[in-house]
């Protein structure tokens, strides 16, 4: 059992800062900087959207050359630097140069992450100011860094885990993330930076992050949209002196990293735009895992399912109807559908079986639906494929936030 | 140019009724019956959802045996008769028997359509009462029939078109439809009954309906959900004495039927749940038509795009980002995006080209976005594939309607 805590104490050889440089109008923190004293082996996963932000294109390029030597990550809000053409690429490069000057490294060693409005150029004078201020403020300021990358998030998301190796050495993995709209599997407006003072190879950094992201960041749906900017990176600087020498050490690192990413990904859903309920959609008994995932995703992106959750309505009909249009050859007769409170299946109530509603009590279902966290389990009765998605309801607040976002 | 009018005068040999039989609580019309004096050649398209209502399964079965002899269509609201097991099938059959007794035909000659809550059994005593009342009221009561099939629709949808053949004979095609939620391509909670007094073969009825539905009912998206009950049928009783003898006659019939279905399908979107804007999404220059359709559909189902329309925000970034995740290998540099008021492209304003926003004036874009009808055109700059979808915005009212639907 991995013990993820909702705070970050210290990660050896890393420092962080979050400052205000005028990107947000209300004086809130709006620019974050994370610096390592040593070169980092770095892995990253990026949006699969065909329309990629300038910073994403630039970071992908840098990692192809300098994945073993990353020293810093700069993150701005307000502008996504997406659909910004040649100037956007120049601005991303200029940001990296300014950071590199401060840190004392090459621009290729600086990742730049952006989030905000698509099509707006980075206001470079403010970015320069942000780099200046953030560099002065560097320290164990992880909470400030997490706050400085928020857009429509209502609270900062940061967590860490301490791991002890076979030989009794200790290292830390810590991460910050943001949501909160354009959230769909395979990344969204979502940004995440994970750091560890354990020593990893580039391949280990990339591989362990891929595995962790596949069961965490890639399992969350707020609105089914996928952004141009999604990026999660893992930087390992080895400053703890801990090498992952045994197979067991690597397994333990993977477990800890996965638990940390799961924690941060779920925090994104919990704090999704307008969210009032955290919903885990579990699909079992599908022909294969991919089919299960497709069904879970169709349920999780259904506007009718999501509004029913907002209405605290145990509307199994919409859940079954969504499953039925997922493109998987389901047999309605074989479906069984449960709801349960919380994130597990304890006390699950069977709502649907043998092609019909069961004789469940509406009050028992209503009591479950009143919880902040609800788990839906759909068994397809076909095979051994299974999957899950973490998602949320669709509320008035979501509409308000997104009808007014640019104005 | 086909002249579709928003009324139904008379269709020779057909009669219609809409009555209240206690299915809806407020005394509103809730049960419709359409009867032909003669056997009808009948085509139909049904939901592709794997979870199909009992009435859909029963109607598919009947059409396999009696597609040349259909005499009546009965439509109830309140209960979808979906996920109702053996009892649901028996109730659908019993409804057909009761209608058949009144009309003087076999149960196989009666189609039964249902719309409403999934998992609720048909209240057969009320249905029997509805059949009794409707049969007494049969006449040219198309408006009442259209009103009697409404659920969350705010207005009845009915229209007709008169066609003159090469030889100067005249016949009518008329139809009623309902929406208004669970609307997605390949049918939704959507019901439609089209009747004509022209004479068609079964194959002509099926084929012309398939062609018309493909460019009308299958092009509409309200919320991206697909229901268990979607059914559109075309009944041709030949009572006008008009045979479609020449190739030109058949083409003219197809054009008139397509225009009628397009009219009714667009009415469904215009009156979709919570809709404040009618949006036509056109995609051109895609690798092929199927890719174009996938892009149009991804845009049309994007919660972020739809809330931006509700907010009257010319948020081209969300449009481009949605296109980018459609699974088509787009090149952002080649995309061009216009918006225009109304349902055409006159006065279209280019918002995005060469990977960046153009230097359009925000006020010009805002003026277009304030219209009730807006057309978005995305040219992919890749090939000759094109498609379109009719859709709408996502409003507070949609959330209210669907959070509270069952209660």
Image: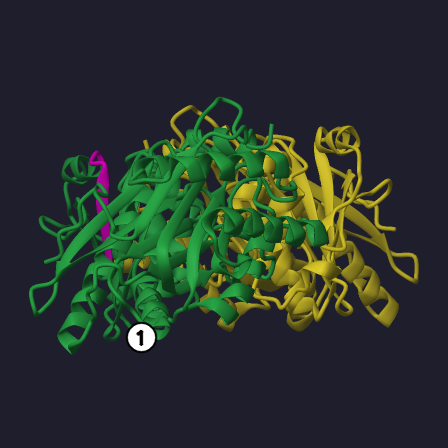
Chain colours: A green, B yellow
Q: Which residue is mark 1?
A: A288
Q: Residue at x 43, y 53 (%)?
A: A72
**Magenta-span inclusion, residue B83:** no
Place of residue B354 in the rendered image (x, y in percent of width and height, measured from the top left): 76, 55
Query: Does residue B397 sit above or below B73 in this rendering?
Result: above
Q: Which part of the image, by quadrant, shows the C terminus of chain B?
A: top left
Residue B218 or residue A120, whichever sits in front? A120
Residue A386 visible here: yes
Name the residue nearer the viewer: B118 or B363: B363
- Splitting the image into 4 quarters, where does residue A269 fall? top left
Q: Write down the region rendered in magenta.
A: A370-377
Predominant SS of the magenta segment: strand
Q: Is residue A383 above or below residue B75?
A: below
Q: Residue at horizontal 60%, vertical 51%? A: A92
Give how far across and how far down residue B169 sits, in percent. 87, 56
The front one of A161 and B49 is A161
Q: Residues within 10 Å of mark 1 (few under 14, many from 20)?
A: some
Q: Quadrant of residue B355?
A: bottom right
The residue lying at 66 percent from left, 72 percent from top is B203
Circle 1: element type = loop
Q: Decide: is B100 above or below B309.
A: below
Pointer 1 indicates a residue of which chain?
A
Furthest residue in direction right, as rendered: B167
């Amino acid at each position: 059992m991995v013990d993820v805590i909702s705070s970050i104490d210290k990660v050896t050889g890393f420092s962080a800062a979050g400052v205000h440089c005028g990107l947000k109008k209300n004086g809130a923190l709006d620019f974050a900087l994370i610096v390592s004293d040593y070169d980092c082996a770095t892995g990253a996963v990026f949006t699969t959207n065909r329309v990629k932000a300038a910073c994403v294109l630039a970071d992908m390029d840098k990692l192809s050359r300098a994945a073993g030597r990353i020293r810093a990550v700069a993150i701005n809000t307000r502008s996504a630097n997406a659909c910004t053409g040649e100037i956007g690429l120049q601005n991303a490069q200029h940001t990296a140069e300014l950071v590199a000057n401060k840190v004392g490294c090459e621009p290729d060693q600086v990742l730049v992450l952006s989030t905000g409005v698509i099509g707006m150029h980075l206001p470079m004078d403010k970015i320069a100011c942000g780099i200046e201020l953030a560099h002065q403020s560097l320290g164990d300021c992880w909470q400030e860094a997490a706050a400085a990358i928020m857009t429509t998030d209502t609270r900062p998301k940061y967590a860490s885990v301490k791991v002890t190796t076979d030989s009794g050495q200790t290292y830390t993995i810590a991460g910050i993330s943001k949501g909160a709209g354009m959230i769909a599997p395979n990344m969204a407006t979502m940004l995440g930076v994970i750091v560890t003072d354990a020593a990893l190879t580039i391949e280990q950094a990339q591989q362990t992050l891929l595995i962790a992201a596949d069961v965490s960041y890639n399992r969350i749906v707020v609105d089914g949209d996928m952004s141009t900017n999604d990026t999660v990176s893992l930087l390992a600087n080895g400053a703890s002196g801990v090498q992952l020498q045994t197979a067991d050490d690597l397994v333990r690192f993977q477990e800890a990293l996965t638990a940390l990413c799961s924690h941060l990904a779920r925090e994104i859903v919990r704090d999704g735009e307008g969210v009032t309920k955290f919903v885990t959609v579990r699909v079992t008994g599908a022909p294969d895992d991919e089919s299960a995932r497709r069904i879970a995703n169709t349920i999780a992106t259904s506007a009718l399912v999501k509004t029913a959750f907002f209405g605290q309505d145990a509307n199994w009909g919409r859940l079954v109807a969504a499953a039925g249009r997922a493109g998987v050859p389901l047999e309605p007769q074989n479906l069984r559908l449960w709801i349960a409170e919380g994130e597990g299946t304890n006390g699950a109530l069977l709502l649907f079986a043998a092609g019909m509603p069961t004789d469940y009590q509406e009050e028992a279902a209503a009591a479950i639906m009143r919880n902040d966290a609800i788990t839906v389990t759909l068994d397809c009765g076909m095979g051994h494929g299974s999957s899950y998605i973490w998602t949320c309801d669709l509320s008035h607040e979501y509409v308000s936030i997104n009808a007014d976002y640019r104005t």
